[in-house]
């Protein structure tokens, strides 16, 4: 454990988590730009932040994450049009996610990469919610974030032993990453294809399938990055969340909106944080032999 050492005092933790939160909300600010501009094919860097109603350039004092929105009471300084509360929510969410990640997973290369993955997931989740589509660039980015972890896991044990504690994930194997790539994505792909065929036969048209290709690729990328245990736990959490979501939708009277992408995103977050312990606990419970000894 790098973070939770006896040599660190309270002040250190407060400073550390404040800095982490500050970084988190600043990156969250950029995520807002990605979520808004990427589906519209706008450049992420070319144009300065502007009001989406009147087009006025946003002044430097008005781009402070969360605080500016609160100070402006959620309205544009030039035209007075409402600014969606989603902006400060995304910023705060990203900050909180970073703090929780380091608190649960310690400060390691893996947790740093997970933070970046969670930021990409926030974009994927909101964009899937808005457009029902997942951007292939963002999905590919998760695969890229997973590469260092895959390479490290493939190193011989004696090489791993000489590496700093920061970069090594104990017990991690390349096989776990390879299985992670396929263990959820393959069944998802099959279910998606089958439900697509059934929908075509039954209704004679290309309806939305149960599981879209984006969901499948998302689970492939997350599984490759974090290994099979986390892939399985993430799918479990994601399906549970989607089911609860569906039931609530039905109870409210409307047709149940099947937002599987955002549910999977939340599932992967909890899967990455707690999935390994959950799967290990499940395996020991299953293999527990009361007649042993
Ligand atoms: Zn405006």
Image (cartoon, rainbow, N blue to C red):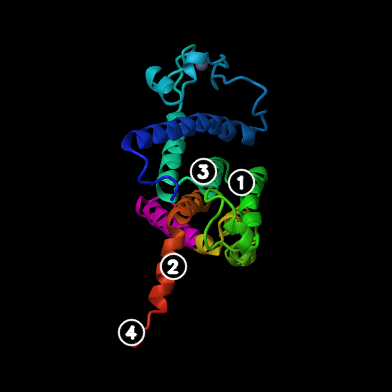
| Residue 188 occupies quadrant | bottom right
Q: In the rendered structure, which disc, 3 or 2, sits on the residue that comes first in sequence?
A: 3
Mark 3 and mark 2 residues within 8 Å of each other at the beta carbon = no
Apparent side of residue 143 relative to residue 86 in the rendered image (left or right): right
Task: Kindly report which numbered mark, 2 or 1, lies closer to the viewer in this rendering.
Answer: 2
User: For numbered disc 3, what is the local secondary structure?
Assistant: helix
Q: Residue at x 56, y 50 (%)?
A: 164
Q: Is residue 165 left or right of residue 104?
A: right
Using the image, determine if residue 63 lies above or below residue 126: above
Query: Sequence-wise, which precedes: disc 3 or disc 1?
Result: 3
Could you tell me if residue 147 is visible in this image? Answer: yes
Q: Earlier in the sequence, mark 3 or mark 4?
A: 3
What is the magenta range?
A: 233-255
Q: Residues within 10 Å of mark 3 (few under 14, many from 20)?
A: many
Q: Is residue 254 magenta?
A: yes
Q: Would you say the residues marked 4 and 1 are in contact, meaning their CB atoms lie under 8 Å apart?
A: no
Ranked by sequence position, the earlier of labels 2 and 1 is 1
């Amino acid at each position: 454990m790098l973070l939770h050492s006896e040599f660190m005092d309270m002040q250190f933790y407060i400073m550390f988590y404040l800095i982490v939160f500050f970084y988190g909300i600043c990156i969250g600010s950029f995520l807002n730009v990605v979520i808004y501009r990427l589906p519209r094919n706008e450049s992420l860097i070319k144009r300065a932040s502007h009001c989406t109603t009147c087009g006025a350039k946003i002044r430097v004092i008005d781009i402070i994450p969360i605080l500016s929105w609160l100070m402006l009471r959620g309205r544009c300084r030039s035209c007075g049009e409402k600014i969606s509360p989603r902006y400060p929510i995304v910023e705060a969410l990203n900050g909180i996610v970073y703090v929780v990640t380091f608190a649960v997973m310690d400060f390691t290369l893996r947790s740093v990469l997970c933070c970046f993955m969670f930021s990409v997931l926030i974009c994927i989740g909101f964009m899937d919610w808005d457009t029902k589509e997942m951007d292939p660039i963002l999905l590919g980015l998760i695969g890229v974030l997973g590469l260092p972890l895959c390479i490290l896991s493939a190193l011989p044990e004696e090489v791993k032993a000489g590496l700093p504690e920061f970069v090594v994930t104990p017990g991690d194997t390349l096989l776990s990453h390879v299985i992670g790539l396929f263990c959820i994505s393959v069944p998802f792909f099959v279910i998606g294809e089958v439900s697509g065929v059934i929908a075509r036969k039954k209704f004679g048209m290309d309806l939305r399938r149960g599981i879209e290709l984006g969901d499948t690729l998302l689970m492939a990328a997350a599984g490759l990055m974090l290994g099979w245990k986390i892939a399985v736990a993430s799918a479990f959490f994601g399906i549970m969340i989607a089911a609860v979501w569906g039931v609530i939708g039905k109870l409210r009277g409307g047709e149940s909106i099947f937002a599987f992408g955002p549910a999977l995103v939340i599932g992967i977050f909890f899967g990455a944080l707690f999935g390994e312990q959950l799967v290990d606990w499940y395996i020991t419970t299953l293999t527990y032999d009361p007649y042993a000894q």
